[in-house]
Image (spheres, rainbow, N blue to C red):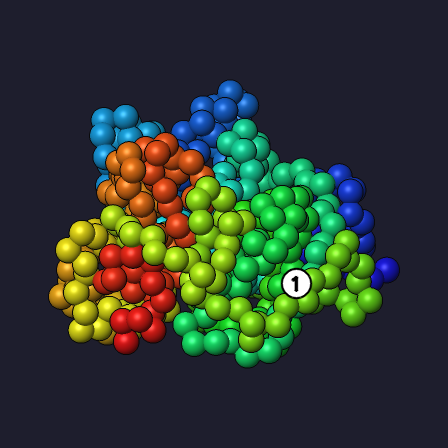
Amino acid sequence: MPMTITEKILAAHAGKEKVTPGELISARVDLVLGNDITAPVAIQEFEKIGVDTVFDQERIALVPDHFVPNKDIKSAGQAKLVKDFAHKHNLSNYFEVGRMGIEHCLLPEQGLVGPGDLVIGADSHTCTYGALGAFSTGVGSTDLAAAMALGETWLKVPESTRFEFEGELKPWVGGKDLILHTIGDIGVDGALYRAMEFTGPIIENLSMDGRFTMCNMAIEAGGKNGIIAPDEITRAYVEGRCRRPYKFYRSDPDAKYARVYHYDASRIEPQVAFPHLPENSRPVSEAGHVEIDQAIIGSCTNGRIGDLREAAKALQGKKVHKNVRLIILPGTQDIYLQALKEGLIETFIEAGAAVSTPTCGPCLGGHMGILAAGERAVSTTNRNFVGRMGHPESEVYLANPAVAAASAVMGRIAGPWEVK
């Protein structure tokens, strides 16, 4: 029976020869993930189960990244609870401030996720790891607790939707623009509980950073997971990095899809998603005159070294507009160090940006970038819901790093060609 890449991975982890969409399965997990917001609830539920210890000390990752460095007493308490649990159970993959990073940038970098894996995390953007050819999806904290005890989870096998990208990318267009264009086309529920499989010549030539960005935002179209078949670009990333054996899966040529979409990437410009949904996407050339107060470059969506390089290209020799705050958050300490070695941090600071230690902070309205009533931000993050980054009367516009950087310079939403 022909199967998609998602179905093959799920079948392998369920110990079955085949699975079909809609089937309920119990599957072993290769890694489970929690952060400083979701892990405390999971830990409390785990203690109720009554087991002595976790299923595997090597396969649980706890990453305090949302409200750290601790923004207040409550967040400090949550972070301590996570740390104490990690120490109690001697977990190998607890990442303290100074060694941590934004979870979905950190785990692939550390080699904790590989092709063919099944990963669940108590964070909706766990779907990021599909860029490596893994099945990864977000779960609730109670499911995380059960998985920490059992090493298994239950899933309904999703239907798959295939997205084919052909043509040639325009300058300044990357993974963020491809996925925003896609969400703008199908809507925020256009792939509800489906596997979003990204294919075609454009994807085959897309960098790992761009692939991570696309799979990261599958959830913004309602997807159960995003996934890209691993290839030589994937192999170059995981070789010498991945800590476990991995396996490359590909969809069968005659695999069944709920729907297939075709996009000519030559027609896609840098995108901007207007408030208050990621589906409100339009070309930056059609944005009009939208003045901003803040720009954010970073997050699990666009905090990787390639993203920082794109931002630096737009900022080189420029100054941030006097009315704008530009906040830049490298995704991990290693990314921060690489940016420092390449002179990117110097470019940012000379332009007038504030550069922070890795944190999710402003993305979820947590800290280090909260918006006041009436303020507008252009951000490389993944969501722009009402009140997402602060006051309910603020506005968030989603864009790629070059657009965010150019907008910071111009004081309004702008294309990067306007500052070069």
Q: Please state which of residues 274 and 93 is positioned toward the viewer in this rendering.
A: 274
Image spot of residue 353 (x, y percent)? 19, 58
- Residue at the location (39% across, 38% down)? 388
Q: Please state which of residues 286 and 164 is positioned toward the viewer in this rendering.
A: 286
Quadrant of image for the N terminus: bottom right
The single residue placed furthest to the right in the displayed view is: 1
Image spot of residue 239 (x, y percent)? 48, 72
Q: Is residue 185 left or right of residue 312?
A: right
For residue 231, above or below residue 376 = below
- Residue at the location (15% across, 55% down)? 322
Q: Is residue 326 left or right of residue 162?
A: left
Image spot of residue 213 (x, y percent)? 47, 59
Q: Is residue 168 left or right of residue 320?
A: right
> How busy is the neighbourhood of tag 1: few (under 14 within 10 Å), some, or many (20 plus)?
some
- Residue at the location (23% across, 35% down)? 71
Q: Is residue 208 visible?
A: no
Q: Please state which of residues 104 and 162 is positioned toward the viewer in this rendering.
A: 162
Amino acid type at mark 1: Phe
Image spot of residue 321 (x, y percent)? 19, 58
Q: Is residue 270 left or right of residue 127?
A: left
For residue 103, above or below residue 371 = below
- Residue at the location (49% across, 58% down)? 282
Q: Is residue 246 visible?
A: yes
According to the picture, the residue beneath numbered tag 1 turns out to be 163
